[in-house]
Image: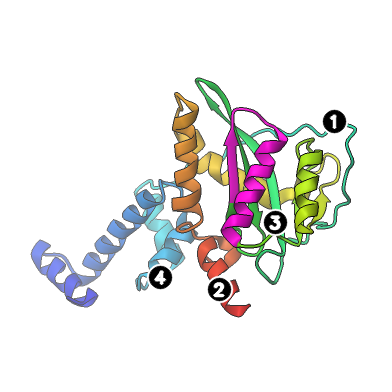
Amino acid sequence: MTRAGYYKWLAKKDQITPAQARREALLQRVIEIFEESNQTYGAPRIHQQLRREGFVCSKRTVEELMRKHEIAPRRKRKFVATTDSKHNLPIAPNVLDRQFEVEHPDEVWVSDITYIDTNQGWLYLCVFIDLYSRMVVGWSMSERMTADLVVGAFEMGVNNQGTAPIVAHSDRGSQYASESYLRVLEGYGCIQSMSRKGNCWDNAVAESFFGALKSEQIYRDHYETRIHASMAVFEYIEIFYNKRRLHSVLDYLTPWEKGQKGKKVA
């Protein structure tokens, strides 16, 4: 049955006009998309997903439906940085210098560390994100915030991508200035870049990812164990964020779609 035919059938079944039937079908899909996103999508992303599926409607219509039916994502909460930049280890220059637009995959990876609260204590998460696709190419979790956490995430990224980045950017945390991490970068011929002191905007892409992770997943649940939290993080990164979450900076492609597009061009 065509979509137009479905609207006519729905209208006849419930004795409503075709226009009302179209709006009812649209509302139903808006609700479904909102729930499929774990109640994280606002009107812009829902509108883009509807367009992908062939619905003809304006973003304003989606906004009106969401407002009328009180459909709204939860507000983001602020969180604090975790890495310790007070150390005497070598500091790399800020090679990236906020140049967050790159032309090819694996030119630049950005990295950061955050923590997740559980009843067993902190679970630390390190990620490496490809600036081109915004995909989390590598990640690692541990109950301790050590250099091994960073090295593990970087090595996972290399295994997943089949290559290392030209530039690896991070803040000035001691984990990123450690001898073991520097040795890994040197082994792959990577250029290290570090943010300026006390300037979170120099690593805005990684900060933005953690903001999304916290507001869209972490703050919606309470974790009894580190295993419980790690399962939630895995699902968010590998099932939702990388493959399904529409990214406004990528013209509403998913990170995976953007990465595939970059490989075809290359």
Tell me whether circle 4 and circle 2 mark residues in contact (CB < 8 Å): no
Amino acid at pointer 1:
Lys
Answer left or right for 216 relative to 180: left
The numbered dot on residue 109 is 3
| Amino acid type at image mark 4 | Arg
What's the residue type where badge 2 is placed? Lys
Residue drawn where x is 35% and y is 57% of the image:
30
Residue 232, how many percent across, how many down? 45, 39
Give left or right: position of 38 versus 94. Answer: left
Can residue 39 be seen here? The reply is yes
Disc 3: CA contacts within 10 A as few (<14), some (14-19) or many (>=20): many
Q: State if disc 1 and disc 3 touch (CB < 8 Å).
A: no
| Observer able to see residue 41 | no
**Would you name the residue on which mark 2 appears?**
261
Q: Which residue is mark 4?
A: 52
Q: Quadrant of the C terminus?
A: bottom right
Magenta stretch, overall SS:
helix
Q: Residue at x 68, y 37 (%)?
A: 148
Q: Position of residue 204 (x, y in %)?
A: 71, 50
The residue segment tinted magenta is: 138-161
